[in-house]
């Protein structure tokens, strides 16, 4: 594959995901909080191209589900009660980019039918809509928190490795302290200190700060090791003799050699951080119901019956894997391109 | 030697710092162990405050810390409110179970990852390299929790692996060989998950470091001298690539007690994980602090080990230190 | 004279020796010699043998009946010990246990209990009144800090225990106490010969921890301790001296062993049960019940739905008079919204209890309008109204209380402040968190903005009991006993579980004062019909004034292998093992699995 194609494919995918995330309201057929209490754990709606008489239609249709009485979560399709899927339909209202209201949706069905392309959760809320609405929060939280962690880690690791001596010792002991302490307790205390009601934007910021700051120690340690040996390189010593400042040396010579480590750590951290929100919501510090994030959607899968019976609830997990894979391929392609240019 | 002595002193100070800060953190968190008893209408407030006094919870922080230090000197490491027993006797058997799991997993990871990383770097864009990259990318993008849950689902669905625990009841009463067999099959699942979790980072770092080493001028010179590729890989490139690996090794050793917490809880392995989780959520303070101190000791050893190895392996660091 | 004395003494000696020989003679073969006052069980006759495997959702913390509080410890202790008077879990009525009969004085203050003769502890030592007196002394001793002590304090004075003769004991109360016999249930009788030394040296609360060797632990229960493996399991073996026998005269229990396996949570318990590693499952979640139901026929187990439990889940508002400082917003909300009866009534009318039962409990639950559930058929007040969900009625109520609606549907109070509040619930309890989310959607129909804050359990407890820093919360209580006295501390204004208004010296409203009076009176009324009337009135007041808005109660769901005989699950705890002496396996041989 040419270098261009190597970049293009993941780039398109990543860009596409982010555009959809930004305009989630348009792509999602329903509001994320809309409960359909008569349809909990409904399986993904089968799309029928042939109607009940066997006639073919270009437009797929969705049939109404009837719940079997006395049996929870078991449904039967009523083939006599089918509704066509329509494009550019008007539906529940939503806000675009926080600026203006709209009620146009890419696709949907007229009520009382429901189209659950990815099934529904325990309250009968459409999983696809929740996935789309939650993507923005999860992706950006993951990226920003990782950025924070790596910046902190790179800064402190480089400083420690470069200066050495007591500076190194202090920072290393801080790292060990950080890795050893039971931070969960501090998070309990943090929750108690904060007011009960946290506005969503504040919650988002808090999320990024907490996740980002808690994780800086490990990357810092790795980077410090690299910096320790890098600073003895020939060209670094030469530059020093020419009167280069410490800051210049760190930025220009030591830091670039840590990029490999940084990129690998980023690939490791982004998926962890996207799901770290799950732990935070257990503590009450995450995003509250009914706002979806991929993390709190996946917390339902931990329950045994959901784990084994409702396979569509794994969708956020697959989404995490796919998106992170595409990030990774994009980063590798960009790196390869940079190497090619460098040579 | 002096370096070692200095580091030991620093580590000791660190342990003291960790214990002090842990006490402070626990103090800050709302709630205490006996809160749960409040939900029982048949226990009066006086009984609860009596219990609190008995266990010394109402004492100020310095007094409690001093008492805890005395208990550490006796080898007890404090007292568990829930189990009514010294913390040390609670931690030891479970720490052994955890180390069994993480020790095997770490060993396996390093045994698999190093050759895989070296080989992929040596034969770049070959089929080993491509498949390794694909595998590690997918594993990197999969969060730990999903892997553990996937294992549980697999065990339940296929019945090939036991669904939890450390050793089956039946094997308990049989001979040593059956016990070992039962233990091995119970370990298979969690160890696999732990290996899958830590494998990709190690493979990636090894590969990246090896590639960098292989691109350097002296390796090119060695190649032009006609030295065999194998010898180049192992004798010339690998020692240079060791740097980030040693730091990772130190972190691996340091996290032997804490890395498997999630997996242990999901597959109900009787290690430190479930005990610690219950203690944290139940505010059984001395158990938490005891476990934290145990884990810190291991962490300090790991860091010390990796620093010593870095010192020994990289002449550049050695020369700087001695200069 | 001296010679005659010697002869008499030797004859007495001979008789004593002979009697002793007989005693010890029978003790030498415990399987053969049943005690004089053996109890005959009425269950189906089975055969001995087999090992029962049961899962425990957390490790037991201690084997000491005086200090144990947590559920798992109490479950194991119940198998190792026996009480004087026992509540039959199936009939919910009292029956004699270690005490074969008792007499009550006319004023209800003195209970004379006759103990059974010839009983032995699991290590062979005889049981008599000294053990009873010692046990109660230990429980009531303030230095032991036993949580059992509060149960034995009636009218703020502890009951006194006196030995009359080796097989009778006198209990004296300071005031008449209704259903006093129920006090004795689950108060384990401790062996004086093993624990007295520890008690005298003040170390009773440290005794019988998990590391104790099996020889140091003894009790009068059907099983005795065999082995404990930390983090994994605890094994109990048959007590060869147990004092119950079946109709054929064979000594119970049938089972050779009970093994308690420790599992970390409910899901792991279900997995082990399905995999065949455990023989019974206690208190299945409604969700897991449906998964198990599908496999019922194919595998060798059966599930039971025993109907509503005693647990009641409820939403309540912060009505405390002592609020945290600098919480003027909370104080205002309390004064203008929460304290208004019509507001609480409207909220109660808007909640869809049927949907909660259907979605949270998969239909295996009961909607509640009162804290006494239908599972308590002795005491439930059937005439408490059960209004169905009605948003229009709720809106009418709110309007009459001075609330109104803005253009966009938001509810505002008389001062045009939009109505919004937070509900806190424990994150570890998935069901209550679900209820909170559903209530959030329900109240949106009224225009109320509800935020659900799901946080860690102890933080929730701290806010409710300590700092009073919350607006509304969802909790679950109940499950102790059917008798009204067991939940006394929830309804009494000064009670420590009067969650909506804690720390009060006096009742703050007239209806709370009325409830206090009624509960006090029924405490010492001895006639059950009068007590029922008073308790009915208490339930009616609670349904009118709504200090708590009851939501739903889960059903008791259990399961067991089909080859387990005499399995009779009950609505009172322990639901599955209460009749462990009678349990047996149809097809398993002694000390072996098929």
Image (cartoon, rainbow, N blue to C red):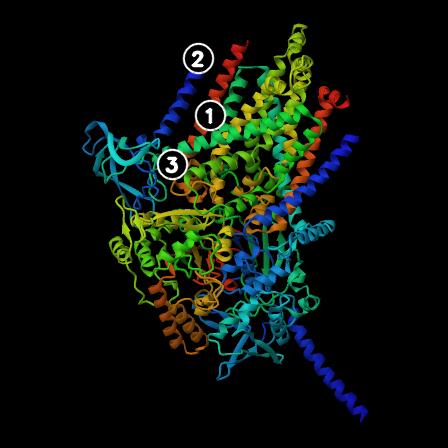
Q: Are marks 3 and 1 in contact (CB under 8 Å)?
A: no
Q: Earlier in the sequence, mark 3 or mark 1?
A: 3
Write down the residue under mark 3. Answer: A312
Distance (Cα) linking label 3 and label 2: 35 Å
Which-is-in-front pick, marks 3 and 1?
1
Q: Secondary structure at mark 2?
A: helix
The image shows residue B226 at horizontal and vertical percentages of 67, 6
In the picture of the structure, the residue carrying the numbered disc 2 is A4
Secondary element type, mark 1? helix
Q: Quadrant of residue C341?
A: bottom left
Q: Is residue A279 visible in the rendered structure shown here?
A: yes
Specify whether A132 is left or right of C155.
Answer: left
**In the rendered image, the vertical position of residue B41 relative to residue C110, given as above or below:** above
Quadrant of residue C130 in the image? bottom right
Check disc 1 and report the residue beneath it. Answer: A325
Q: Are marks 3 and 2 on the same chain?
A: yes
Q: Nearer the viewer, residue C10 or C521?
A: C521
Quarter of the image for the N terminus of chain B: give it: top right
State the residue lying farthest toward the front. C415
- Say which quarter of the image contains residue C551: bottom left
Residue C483: tell me if it is visible.
no
């Amino acid at each position: 594959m040419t270098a261009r194609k190597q970049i293009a494919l993941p780039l398109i995918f990543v860009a596409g995901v982010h555009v959809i995330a930004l305009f989630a309201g348009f792509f999602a057929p329903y509001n994320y909080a809309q409960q359909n209490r008569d349809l909990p754990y409904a399986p993904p709606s089968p799309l029928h191209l042939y109607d009940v008489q066997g006639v073919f239609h270009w437009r797929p249709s969705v049939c109404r589900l009837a719940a079997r009485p006395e049996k929870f979560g078991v449904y039967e399709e009523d083939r006599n009660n089918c509704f066509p899927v329509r494009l550019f339909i008007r539906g529940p209202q939503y806000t675009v980019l926080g600026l203006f209201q709209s009620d146009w949706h890419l696709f949907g069905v007229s009520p009382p039918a429901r189209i659950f392309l990815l099934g529904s959760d325990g309250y009968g809320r459409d999983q696809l809509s929740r996935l789309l609405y939650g993507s923005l929060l999860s992706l950006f939280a993951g990226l920003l928190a990782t950025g924070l962690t790596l910046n902190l880690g790179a800064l402190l690791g480089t400083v420690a490795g470069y200066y050495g001596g007591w500076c190194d010792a202090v920072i290393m002991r801080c790292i060990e302290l950080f890795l050893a302490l039971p931070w969960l307790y501090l998070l309990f205390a943090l929750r108690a200190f904060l007011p009960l009601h946290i506005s969503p934007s504040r919650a988002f910021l808090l999320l990024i700060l907490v996740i980002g700051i808690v994780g800086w120690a490990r990357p810092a340690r790795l980077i410090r090791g690299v910096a320790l040996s890098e600073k003895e390189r020939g060209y670094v010593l030469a530059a020093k003799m020419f009167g280069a400042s410490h800051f210049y040396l760190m930025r220009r010579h030591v830091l670039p050699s840590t990029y490999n480590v940084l990129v690998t750590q980023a690939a490791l951290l982004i998926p962890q951080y996207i799901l770290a929100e799950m732990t935070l919501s257990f503590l009450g510090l995450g995003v509250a119901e009914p706002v979806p994030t991929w993390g709190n959607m996946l917390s339902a899968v931990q329950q045994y019956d959901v784990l084994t019976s409702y396979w569509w609830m794994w969708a956020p997990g697959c989404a995490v894997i796919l998106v992170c894979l595409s990030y990774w391929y994009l980063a590798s392609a960009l790196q390869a391109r940079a190497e090619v240019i460098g040579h | 030697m002096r370096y070692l002595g200095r580091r030991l002193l620093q580590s000791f100070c660190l342990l003291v710092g960790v214990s002090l800060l842990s006490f402070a953190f626990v103090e800050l968190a709302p709630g205490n162990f006996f809160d749960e008893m409040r939900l029982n209408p048949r226990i009066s407030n006086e009984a609860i405050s009596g219990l609190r006094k008995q266990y010394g919870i109402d004492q100020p922080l310095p007094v409690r810390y001093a008492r805890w230090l005395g208990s550490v000197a006796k080898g007890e490491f404090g007292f568990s409110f829930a189990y009514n027993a010294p913390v040390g006797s609670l931690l030891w058997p479970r720490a052994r179970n955890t180390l069994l799991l993480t020790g095997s997993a770490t060993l396996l990871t390093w045994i698999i990852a190093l050759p895989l990383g070296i080989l992929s770097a040596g034969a770049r864009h070959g089929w080993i390299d491509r498949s390794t990259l694909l595998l590690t990318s997918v594993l990197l993008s999969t969060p730990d929790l999903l892997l553990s849950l996937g294992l549980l689902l697999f065990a339940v669905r296929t019945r090939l692996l036991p669904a939890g625990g450390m050793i089956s009841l039946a094997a308990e009463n049989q001979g040593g060989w059956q016990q070992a067999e039962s233990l091995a099959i119970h370990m298979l699942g969690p160890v696999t998950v732990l290996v899958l979790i830590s494998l990709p980072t190690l493979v990636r770092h090894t590969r990246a470091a090896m590639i960098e080493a292989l691109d350097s001028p002296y390796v090119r010179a060695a190649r032009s001298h006609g030295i065999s590729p194998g010898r180049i890989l192992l004798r010339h490139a690998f020692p240079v690539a060791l740097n980030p690996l040693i730091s990772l090794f130190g972190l691996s050793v340091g996290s032997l007690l804490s890395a498997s917490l999630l997996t242990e809880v999901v597959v109900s392995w009787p290690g430190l994980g479930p005990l610690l989780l219950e203690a944290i959520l139940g505010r059984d303070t001395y158990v938490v602090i005891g476990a934290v101190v145990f884990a810190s000791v291991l962490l300090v050893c790991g860091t010390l080990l990796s620093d010593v190895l870095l010192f020994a392996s990289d002449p550049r660091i050695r020369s700087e230190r001695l200069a | 004279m001296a010679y005659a004395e010697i002869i008499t003494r030797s004859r007495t000696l001979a008789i004593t020796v002979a009697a002793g020989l007989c005693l010890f003679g029978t003790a030498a073969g415990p399987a053969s010699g049943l005690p004089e006052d053996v109890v005959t069980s009425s269950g189906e006759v089975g055969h001995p043998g087999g090992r029962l495997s049961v899962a425990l959702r957390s490790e037991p913390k201690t084997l000491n009946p005086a200090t144990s509080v947590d559920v798992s410890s109490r479950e194991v202790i119940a198998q190792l010990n026996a009480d004087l008077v026992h509540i039959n879990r199936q009939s919910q009525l009292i029956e004699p246990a270690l005490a074969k009969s008792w007499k009550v004085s006319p004023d209800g203050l003195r209970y004379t209990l006759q103990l059974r003769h010839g009983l032995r502890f699991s290590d062979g030592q005889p049981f008599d009144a000294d053990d009873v007196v010692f046990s109660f002394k230990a429980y009531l001793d303030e230095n032991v800090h036993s949580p059992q002590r509060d149960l034995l304090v009636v009218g703020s004075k502890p009951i006194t225990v006196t030995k009359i003769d080796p097989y009778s004991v006198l209990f004296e109360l300071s005031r008449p106490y209704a259903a006093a016999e129920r006090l004795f249930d689950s108060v384990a009788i401790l062996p004086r010969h093993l624990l007295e030394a520890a008690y005298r040296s003040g170390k009773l609360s440290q005794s019988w921890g998990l590391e104790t060797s099996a020889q140091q632990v003894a009790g009068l229960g059907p099983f005795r301790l065999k082995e404990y493996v930390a983090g994994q399991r605890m094994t109990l073996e048959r007590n060869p001296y147990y004092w119950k026998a079946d109709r054929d005269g064979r000594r119970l229990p049938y089972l050779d062993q009970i093994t308690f396996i420790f599992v970390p949570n409910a899901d792991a318990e279900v997995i082990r049960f399905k995999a065949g590693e455990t023989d019974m499952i206690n208190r299945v979640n409604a969700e897991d019940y449906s998964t198990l139901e599908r496999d019922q026929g194919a595998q060798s187990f059966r599930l039971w739905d025993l109907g509503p439990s005693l647990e009641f889940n409820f939403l309540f508002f912060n009505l405390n008079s002592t609020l945290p400082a600098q919480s003027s917003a909370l104080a205002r909300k309390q004064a203008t919204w929460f304290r208004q009866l019509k507001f609480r009534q409207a909220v109660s009318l808007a909640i869809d209890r049927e949907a909660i039962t259907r979605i949270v409990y998969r239909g295996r639950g009961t909607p509640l309008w009162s804290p006494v559930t239908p599972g308590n058929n002795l005491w439930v007040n059937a005439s408490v109204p059960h209004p169905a969900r009605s948003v229009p009625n709720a809106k009418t109520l709110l309007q009459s209380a001075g609330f109104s609606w803005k253009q966009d549907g938001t509810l505002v109070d008389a001062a045009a402040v939009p109505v919004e509040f937070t509900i806190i619930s424990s994150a570890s309890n998935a069901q209550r968190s679900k209820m909170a989310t559903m209530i959030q959607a329900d109240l949106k129909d009224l225009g109320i903005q509800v935020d659900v804050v799901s946080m860690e359990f102890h933080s929730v407890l701290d806010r409710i009991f300590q700092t009073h820093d919350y607006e509304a919360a969802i909790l679950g209580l109940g499950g102790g006993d059917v008798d009204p006295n067991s939940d006394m501390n929830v309804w009494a204004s000064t009670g420590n579980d009067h969650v909506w208004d804690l720390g009060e010296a006096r009742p703050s409203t007239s209806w709370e004062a009325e409830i206090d009076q009624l509960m006090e009176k029924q405490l010492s009324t001895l006639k059950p019909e009068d007590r029922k009337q008073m308790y009915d009135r208490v339930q009616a007041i609670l349904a009118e004034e709504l200090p708590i808005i009851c939501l739903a109660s889960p059903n008791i769901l259990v399961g067991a292998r089909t080859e387990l005989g005499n399995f009779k699950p009950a609505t009172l705890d322990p639901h599955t093992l209460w009749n462990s002496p009678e349990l047996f396996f149809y097809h398993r041989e002694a000390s072996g699995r098929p």
